[in-house]
Image (tube, rainbow, N blue to C red):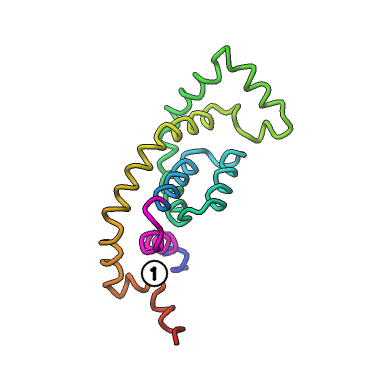
Amino acid sequence: MLSLLLHPLRQLFAALLTNDSPNQLSIGFTIGMVLGFVPKGNLIALSLAVLLCAVKVNRSAGLVAAAIFSCVGPWADGLTHKLGSTLLHQPGLQGFFAWIYDLPLGPFIGFHNTVTIGSLLLALYVTYPCYYGSHLLFERYGPPVARWVTRYRIGRALTGAHFAARFEG
């Protein structure tokens, strides 16, 4: 049970301690942010999860971001509903959305839901600021935090370093 509770914290430390570049950490964090904002249970969220796992990015950073923004996302539902409703009620786009809905997997995509399309729009709008900000944070604070975490016994235990030391040589 304790292992289940500490798993997100271990994922966060694993993201900071890996030898991935700040670009890989930031792109993983950004894809996780978009995944976290979009409501789950549609083809958009599934596609984003597959993208996170298929591309060479830091999955731990993406999963931590998805967990964080999955908690933050519902607070923006009022705004995303208004954005999605505005987009879906545009006369020039109604034919396009009707065509998508009539596709074989169209209803599962989620474009007919105002919150889903609004969340996707909002997440895509903040994609570059999220990438840029997380890149600056990972570049500046990643190495000092990694040194700080590995200095303490609890940090080494959370990262699994003590398990690796047992099996060396």
User: Could you say where residue 38 lies in the image, as x and y percent from the top left?
Assistant: 50, 38
* Figure check: 125 above or below 136: above
Choose between 145 and 45: the one closer to the eye: 145
Residue at 34% over, 47% down: 135
* Figure check: 95 above or below 130: above
Give the magenta-colored segment's residue range: 7-23
Tell me the element at label 1.
Answer: helix
Q: Residues within 10 Å of mark 1 (few under 14, many from 20)?
A: many
Residue 21, magenta (yes or no): yes
User: Could you say where residue 134 lies in the image, as x and y percent from the top left?
Assistant: 34, 47
Residue projecting furthest to the top:
91
Q: Quadrant of residue 16?
A: bottom left
User: Could you say where residue 142 lies in the image, as x and y percent from the top left?
Assistant: 30, 58
Left or right: residue 91 versus residue 136 is right
Residue at 41% over, 33% down: 76
Q: Quadrant of the C terminus?
A: bottom left
Q: Amino acid at mark 1?
A: Thr
Q: How many marks?
A: 1
Q: Quadrant of residue 72?
A: top left
Q: Main secondary structure of the magenta part?
A: helix
Residue 141, magenta (yes or no): no
User: Could you say where residue 150 lies in the image, as x and y percent from the top left?
Assistant: 30, 70
Residue highlighted by disc 1: 159
Residue at 44% over, 43% down: 33
* Figure check: 15 above or below 91: below
* Figure check: 20 above or below 129: below
Choose between 153 and 62: the one closer to the eye: 62
Residue at 53% over, 32% down: 116
